[in-house]
Structures are given as structure tokens and as C-alpha cells.
Image (spheres, rainbow, N blue to C red):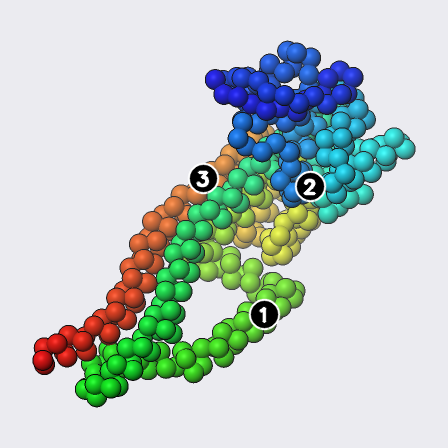
Amino acid sequence: MTEFVYRAADARGKIRRGMLAAANRAEAMASLRAQGLFPLEVEETGRPLGRNGRTGGDLLAFTQQLATMLGAGLQLDRAMGLAGELYGGTSFGRILADVRRRLQEGASFSTALAAHPRVFGRLYVNMVRAGETGGVLPIVLRRLAQTIEEERDLRGYLLSAFLYPSVVAGASLLAVVILLGWVVPRFALIFARLGQDLPTLTRLTLALSRFLAAYGLWCALGLSAAAVIGWTLLRSPAGQMAWERFLLEAPLLGDLYRKLVTARLTRTLAMLLGAGVPVLDAFNVTAETSTNHMVKNALARAAREIGQGGSIARRLAAQGVLPAMAVQMIAVGEETGELASMLEQVAKAYEAETRRTIRNLLALLEPALILILTGITLLIALSILLPMVGMSAGL
């Protein structure tokens, strides 16, 4: 059994906190419901309850909580009131209070959410609108929460996957700078006093050390200026288009990036179509939520062509954004009338393929990086040791 801390609301809307023992989180939530409580947060002991301070995490937790409360039969106004109490005086809590105020003034839930586009994006609002129209808001919210969590998990996997190589590269580069900037110059004084001929490797290392001492600061300033200029250019429309084109067309990186784009695009389309959003609206919303301008323009063109009739898969293939295999799977889903479920399968397949590709890249990158940086350090050490060995042999 595992101990869980929970935060739940009773039938009168009062917030209760406590601890309970259960085999897993699902059993803990079932136990709370059996007691007549609506679970808001249930976490294992030792992991913090509450918010992580970021809107993305708050949005996921709020969506999960609201789906649970509405699914348990709570009215939307009461559920929003409980959610507002849960987040208190935080910025997200104030946003929820404003959404509830708009609801009480007669606005629909989707319209109230749309008043805060930086928190509730167009995709979120359209999904909620579809849930309202179809009377399946709790189901749509659960699907939204699942999608937000899956995207967050994928993003976290990508960050953690490249964290170790980055730390290794940074630490090794720092070690090389320390060797060239502080260690080698001290041995250079010893070699100068001895006045003996130095091996070629030692002379090259000493020259590099002198260059670093004389121009290292200027090199650092130049690299910083280049980084700032590059960042500024990338933020411009032309720079963004050039960078996005490079990401899609680069030999190795492009394949990985295209898989990521395909997974996100097809998951968004699957979620919208599964919620009952019309095809054209689903394509337009997906285009608006895309962060890649080339993909956004391609989807917008595809939406216009689909509006004129014809196969969705063929229109997508003509834009050249999705891989051929994804287009073929979409065509099968279109022919069988299971487009939403097929898009979901495409998303899962390409997410799995992305993870495999990253694992394979890291399996090659990590040892290669270690060998290269270790080799550089070894060369510096040899450049110092060779004159000392020669000096010992001459004694």
C-alpha cells in the first residue's frame, strides 16, 4: 500500500485535505468518491501537492480536475468555483475567477475561456466549444487533459534526453579552457627556462594557450554578439522561415523534426475530429496552433483545397509536409470512415518513432562526444608530458 495526500471537495463545496492508503492513485480516487468526495488532487506522499507555478502545469491540472468534477455530476458554475478556491490568489486563480464571472453573466464556457487567449489557446477553446455543442464536455476535457499531458511528457523526454550530452560537453569544454588558460601557461614558463627544443604538439598547444590568453575575452564577446544577432535574426519573419526550412530539410535533424511535427499535427487533428469539429474547422484550428510557419501555410492551403472537394490524404500529400507513410495511413482511415482513430494511431506511431530515433542518436552521440573530448584533453596532457619525458631521458 502507498500513502497518498489528497485535496477534495464535499457535496457542499467545502475543501477537505488529508491522507489515505491505497494500492495506486486510481484506487485512492475511487476511495474518495465512495466517501462522497470529489477528488481535486491526489498525489503520493513525498511529492508536492499543489501547483508548480507554471501556467502549463496549472492548465493540465485544472483540465483534469474540471473533467472529474463535471463527470461526477457537478454543475459547471460550482465546479469553476471549487477550481477558483483551489488556485486561490494566484494569477491562474484570478483568470479562473474571471471565467466564472463571465459564465454567471450569461456567456458560454468557450466564450469565457476565449477572453484569455494566452492561457486557453484556440485549440483549447474550440475543443470546449465542440464539447458544449455535443453535450459531451467532460469527455472532451478528459481528452484535452490526456493530449496536454502526452505533449508535456514528450517535451520532457526530449529535454532530458539531450541534457546529459549537453552537461558532458559543457564540463569537458570548461576543463579544456582551464587547462589552456591556467595549467599550460605555468608549464610554458618552465619550458622557457629550460631552453630546450619542444615537440611539435607542445608548440601547438603553447601557441593555442597564448592565443586564448591574448584574445580569449574578445572571442567570448564576439561569440556572444553573434549569438544575440543570430537570435534577433531568427525572431524576424524571414529568419523564422529560413530556420524552419532548415529544420525540415536538414539531412538527419530534418527527419527527426518532421516526425515531431507529424505527431503533433495528427494528434491535434484527431482530437478535434473526434470531438465532432467539422473537417475544415479542424484543419484551420490545427494550422493556427502550429508553431512552424511552413506547416501552418501548408495546412491552410490544404484546408482551402479540401473545401473544394477531394481526398484529404491527397491534399495533404500535395503539400509535402507529412511523410508518405503517414499520408497512406490517413488515406486508409478516410476510406474506412475511421479518420479520427487513424490520425490517433499515426500520432502514436510517430511519437514512438521519435523516441526510437533519439535513443539511436544518443547511443552514437554520447560515446563519440566522450571520445572526442577525452582525446582533446589527452593531447593537451601529452603536450605537457612529452618535454618532461625528454628532459628526464637527457639527465
The x, y position of residue 68, in whole percent, is 67, 23
Residue 281 quadrant: top right
Residue identified by numbered label 3:
352
Identity of the residue drawn at 78% across and 17% down:
12
Residue at 90% from the left image edge and 33% from the top image edge? 105
Left or right: where does residue 273 sit relative to residue 117? left
Q: What's the mark number on residue 228? A: 1
The reply to whether discs 3 and 2 touch (Cβ–Cβ < 8 Å) is no
Q: Is residue 116 above or below residue 137?
A: below
- The numbered dot on residue 123 is 2
Task: Identify the amino acid type marked 2.
Answer: Leu
Q: Dot 2: few (<14), some (14–19), or many (≥20) neighbours within 10 Å?
A: many
Q: Judge the density around disc 3: few (<14), some (14-19), many (≥20) Cα neighbours within 10 Å.
A: some
Relative depth, front residue between 365 and 347: 365
- Residue at mark 1 to residue at mark 3: CA–CA distance: 35 Å
> Which residue is more in the foreground, 391 or 22?
391
Which residue appears at 59% of the width and 66% of the height?
Answer: 231
In which quarter of the view is residue 141 placed? top right
Residue type pointed to by label 1: Val
- Amino acid type, callout 3: Ala
Q: Spot the residue most to the right.
A: 105
Q: Secondary structure at mark 2?
A: helix
- Locate residue 280, reporting x and y percent: 69, 41
